[in-house]
Image: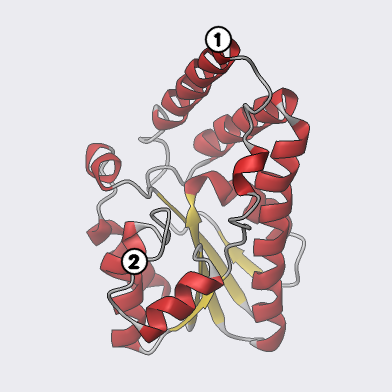
Amino acid sequence: MTVVGVLGTIHNPELREKYHCPLALYESIITEFKPDIICGEVHPLSWQKYLKDRTDKGYWGEPASEYWELIFPLCENNNIEFVPIDWFELDVWNQFDPFGGYAEEQRAELQQIDDEWFLKQMSTYEAGSIPFNSVEFDEMTRLKYEWLNQINPTAHNIRWVVRNQIMIQRVKNIMDSNQGKRILCIVGADHNYVFQEALTKEPIQLVYPLR
């Protein structure tokens, strides 16, 4: 049977240090899972740029630092196939700002609420064996995105719903063509609950959290 794992990461190095999820932890978890394939939150165009030039760091800070510093080298050194699964369109992304259309004062208020949601998410870091891979974190994250949907349903649909649907479909494509393999999905921790809900419905052995 195909085994699919989900590992949610924190992209920011300072936050990884603050909340006790260093790259060494991610490396040990990945090594324990022994993936044949890693599906990562990397845009296909960035992946192609990386293959042509290992010094090309992409754009918009994408891919996140854990890919450059850990995941790409780990795949190369251990013969693990890497598949980019992220999706967004740079030419229209900013037009779907979740706080777009609000006056400056309202935007500031909404941003403050968004920051409060982030702190609530971070407060769950001690739940579970892997920081931000837990029922507590996932439930807080779900509530945050329900709030964002209320603020701007159109932006939420494009930036969150559609993006996740495409990412998950790319994982399903890999599953279909690699039956019986061990596939690890590495995404920002906010995506955990969406991936878990979708992949639970598939005829696979889903492993989440990984510890």
Mark with earlier residue (1, 2): 2
Name the element at disc 2. Answer: loop
Measured Cα–Cα span from mark 1 to mark 2 = 35 Å
Question: Which quadrant holds residue 100?
Answer: top right
Left or right of 83, for residue 131: left
Q: Residue furthest front?
A: 91
Q: Report the front residue among 201 and 108.
A: 108
Name the residue rendered at 70%, 23% in the picture. Answer: 151
Left or right of 85, for residue 150: right
Tell me residue 46's x, y (percent).
47, 70
Q: Which residue is mark 1?
A: 105
Which disc, if any, is residue 57? 2
Work out whether 21 lies above or below 79.
above
Q: How would you rate the neighbour count of disc 2 (Cα within 10 Å): few for under 14, some for 14-19, many for 20 or more?
A: some
Name the residue rendered at 64%, 70% in the picture. Answer: 205
Work out whether 26 lies above or below 96.
below
